[in-house]
Amino acid sequence: MKLKTLAILLSLAAALPAVASTQPHWAYEGKGSPEHWGEISDEFQTCKTGQYQSPVDIKHVIDGKLPPLGLNFRTDTESIVNNGHTIMVDVQDSDDFMLDNDRFELKQFHFHTPSENLIAGKSYPLEAHFVHANKAGELTVVAVMFEEGAENEALNPLIAAIPAQLNHEVKMEKSIDLAKLFPADEHYYRFSGSLTTPPCTEGVRWLILKQPVTLSAQQLQAFQKALKHTNNRPLQPLHGRVVVE
Ligand SMILES: [Zn+2]
């Protein structure tokens, strides 16, 4: 699969209804659960055969003296959808950062509960994935871990806007201050991985911010209630991959 089509595929995969007659049905429970993803469709084979799959448990980290990320925030218009797989916010702005001498621009972000990736065996109640793409369509996912604690005010307009109806995308009236969803310390772990949902395409750069942010127990419940089920793919083997910090 061409990397150019990745970004489109990703947003398509995430935007598709949970049950669509023309598309194979994948899920987190039952017949379409993660252990069967690779068999649901030829297009999903990488979910089974891939050697660089996500998520992973981050351990055996090598010190590569990676500098902090340096995110630029220019938040503009956003729309939000609950597609049955996740709560996803589409952005029409140009939040970006530089990596490998290339500019990666934010396309959408979404949430998993509990976290998909683990840090040294530790699971978090919520993980946000900020999906970025460069001009060539190559993807970098910046992940932020949330732990239970103080209320995160920046999440309130998002939680308030979650549509009750599945697959019903609505424009957000109040935009989210994305900067406040990120920790002050932008140091991260880096490794190569895949989409964590079918088609599980590889070649995705993963940057997991080390410092978690917080959300309140009530805010966490709002995500859990909207999603109705957990949406974390099980851990995948590292297969000799190296995690750098
Ligand atoms: Zn994700």
Image: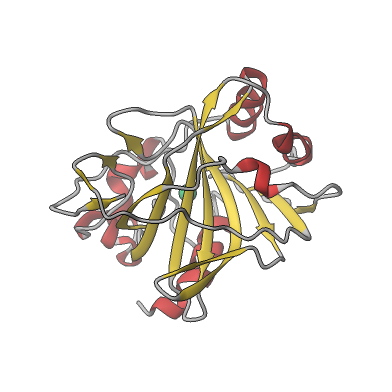
| Image position of 35 (left or right of 80) | left
Q: Where is residue 96? Give x, y as percent.
A: 59, 65
For residue 219, above or below residue 199: above
Give the colour scheme of this rendering: secondary structure
What residue lies at 64% left-to-right and 32% top-to-bottom? 226
Residue 22 visible to the viewer: no
For residue 38, above or below residue 222: below
Q: Where is residue 70? Give x, y as percent.
A: 54, 58
Q: Which residue is more in the foreground, 137 or 87?
A: 137
Q: Where is residue 200? Give x, y as percent.
A: 35, 58
What residue lies at 28% left-to-right and 41% top-to-bottom? 58
Q: Which residue is more in the foreground, 160 or 12?
A: 160
Image quadrant for the N terminus?
Answer: bottom left
| Image position of 86 (left or right of 238) | right
Farthest residue, direction right: 173
Res 108 → quadrant: bottom right
Q: Where is residue 225? Give x, y as percent.
A: 63, 27
Q: Which residue is more in the foreground, 240 or 30?
A: 240
Farthest residue, direction left: 240
Q: Which residue is more in the foreground, 203 or 27?
A: 203
Residue 230 visible to the viewer: yes
| Image position of 57 (left or right of 148) | left
What residue lies at 19% left-to-right and 45% top-to-bottom? 237
Q: How many marks?
A: 0
